Amino acid sequence: VKQIFLRSLLNLASDMQKDTTVWRNARIATCDATMTVFDPGAIVSREGLIIWVGAEQDLPQEFKQPAVINEDLQQRWLTPALIDCHTHLIYAGNRADEFAARLQGASYAQIAQRGGGINSTVRATRAASEQQLFDLSVPRLQSLLAEGVGCIEIKSGYGLNFETEAKMLRVARRLAASFPVTIKTTFLGAHAVPPEYQNQTDQYLQQVAFDWLPRLHDAGLVDAVDIFCESIAFNLQHADLLFEQAQKRNIPIKMHAEQLTNLGGSKLAARYRALSCDHLEYTTAEDVVALAGAGTVAVLLPVAFYCLAEKQLPPIAALRSHGVPMAVASDSNPGSAPGASLLLALNMGCRFFGLHAAEVLAGATRHAARALGEQEQRGSLSVGRCADFAVWNIQSLDEIGYWSGFNPCHGLIRAGRWVSRSNSHANTH
Ligand SMILES: [Zn+2]
């Protein structure tokens, strides 16, 4: 009887360790507020969550049993899986012809007159079937996953009619169901005024705010709402009206603000305690104070700055000194950021915006999570958060923002399991 009792106790102990993995011999960057590093460190996952993290020498005895899966990371760096918190990843067609025309001297106005710009993407996206839209988006998603990205925000905004906006958001949900990635959807019906509402911006915005937003939200397709608040798009009154409707339903708010001019968008967004304000090239010191007070994340998009050959820099020093959390995202879209590389965005954030290596790492992890309202779930490594990790063939964390056009990611772990893994060597020397 004693033996049977002992055996069942042992079984119980090994049951408890089921699905427990120790990721050891790693150099761990927690990316929490203190940017703690454990080198050599270990991290323990169970049922998709982190249950322990620390210096390897402090690993508790219970995780050294044979029932625990042991993964030797060979001194590679391990960070939280990266988060791309601003993308327009789902679209049909592309705008290479416009890029070529611009190289030959065509102006934006001329391109727009020919039916180019966002309208050409809207036409192609409306014409694509849901399956085509899905298939076109997959390679872009895979490109991000290969860079260690485990969570992506995707906006609608190339439909500009109810049917196509819904189609884009359904494709986003299908991508999340088909790939090992967390996807947060943002309804951006207020991206541009579609041709059928020309000179009826107010009517279009009312349609978006009072009709489409509630219907799409009821359908479970909307995690947040966004608006392009800009001289060429929607004004402050439009944003106010949309946000009021979002607030009634507790839908988190984001805003494309101060990219080309300053309309006071970030101040308004701060008043609504927006999750994030994105772009911010023309943000003033006063706006920065408002963002800091609201805890709103500044999402910086250096690839668009580069592609549009902008000159005006976002006020990095002011954001830094007021402690506004700064995220960096790819902005993947066919007009101003063709491609799908978060690592390139980080490199450009360093080069163009003068962000520090530690800032771009936090900007693609902890602060990006906050920009999506996901800071309790992901973006840093601590007990209770998701066991979503990126593993790197790098010698120092400075390399995360250093490479441009080269991907040093070794592999991606999601919910405590390998999603992908290269067969490259650890490059620790
Ligand atoms: Zn955008």
Image: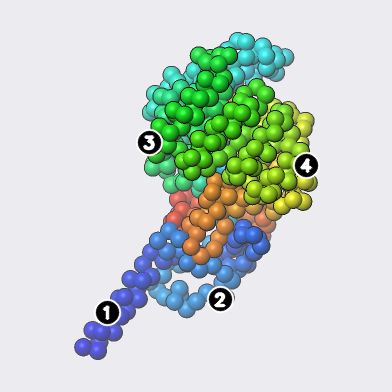
Mark nearest the camera among 3 and 2 is: 3
The alpha-carbon separation of the residues under discs 4 and 3 comes to: 40 Å
Question: Would you say residue 333 is visible in this rendering?
Answer: no
268 on left or right of 194: right
Mark nearest the camera among 4 and 2 is: 4
Amino acid type, label 4: Ala
Which sits earlier in the primary sequence, circle 4 or circle 2?
2
Which sits earlier in the primary sequence, circle 3 or circle 2?
2
Which sits earlier in the primary sequence, circle 2 or circle 1?
1
Residue beneath disc 3: 219
Q: Is mark 1 within 8 Å of ligand 1?
A: no
Residue beneath disc 1: 8
In this view, the residue in front, 412 or 293, is: 293
Amino acid type, label 1: Ser
In this view, the residue in front, 12 or 250, is: 250
Q: Quadrant of residue 222?
A: top left
